[in-house]
């Protein structure tokens, strides 16, 4: 557990960037502590992007999203973000909202909010620029 905590601190302190789908998926893999699935059953003729998508470990993502949702589902600012994000899919389900925040278009801003919330919860307020940047993107 201690090593996992150290890896989390290291990753949270590292800047994240992506400009391609592959880079984005790698960022999410790192954030969710994913292990690549076995690719020996994947057709050799499949294109690289499809192969990369098939290697995505959904259980790690689900576990991370559950952890995040459980620690934020009663926080009013997170609820507001989840509601706005869910509305993008004509939904009122806050967990759908979290999934939207994990999407390519919003993940960087979501990540910055999550980092702020974990590292400095007292700074995660409505007037904070990091929060406002994500809110206005939605």
Image: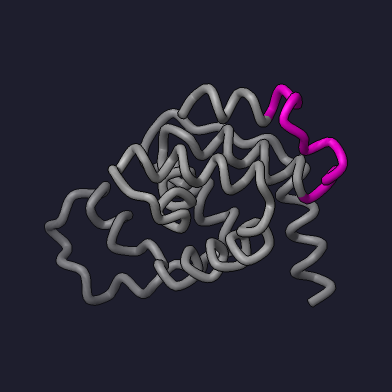
In the image, taking residue 9 as reference, residue 38 lies left or right, namely left
Q: Quadrant of residue 90?
A: top left
25, above or below 107, in the image:
below
Q: Is residue 127 magenta?
A: yes
Measuring 41% from the left and 67% from the top, which residue is drawn there?
A: 57
Here the colouring is one colour
Question: Looking at the picture, how far across and down is residue 64, in whole percent?
Answer: 57, 64
The N terminus lies in quadrant: bottom right
Q: Is residue 86 magenta?
A: no
Q: Nearer the viewer, residue 48 or 95?
A: 95
Left or right of residue 54, residue 125 in this image:
right
Q: Quadrant of residue 128?
A: top right
Give the vertical position of 49 relative to 35 (above or below): above
What residue is shown at x 44% (from left), y 48% (from top)? 97
Q: What percent of the width, then of the height, locates residue 72? A: 65, 56
State which region is magenta. Answer: 118-130
18 or 39, which is in the foreground?
18
Q: Which residue does the image show at 26% across and 47% down from the upper left? A: 49
Say which quarter of the image contains residue 115: top right
Choose between 12 and 92: the one closer to the eye. Answer: 92
């Amino acid at each position: 557990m201690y090593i996992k905590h150290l890896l989390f601190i290291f990753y949270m302190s590292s800047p994240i960037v992506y400009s391609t789908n592959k880079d984005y998926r790698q960022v999410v893999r790192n954030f969710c502590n994913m292990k690549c699935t076995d690719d020996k059953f994947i057709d050799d003729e499949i294109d690289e992007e499809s192969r990369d998508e098939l290697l995505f470990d959904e259980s790690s993502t689900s576990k991370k999203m559950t952890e995040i949702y459980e620690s934020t589902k009663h926080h009013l600012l997170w609820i507001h973000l989840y509601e706005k994000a869910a509305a993008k899919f004509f939904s009122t389900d806050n967990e759908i909202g979290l999934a939207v925040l994990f999407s390519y278009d919003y993940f960087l801003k979501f990540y910055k909010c999550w980092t702020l919330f974990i590292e400095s919860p007292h700074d995660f307020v409505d007037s904070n620029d990091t929060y406002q940047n994500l809110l206005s993107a939605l």
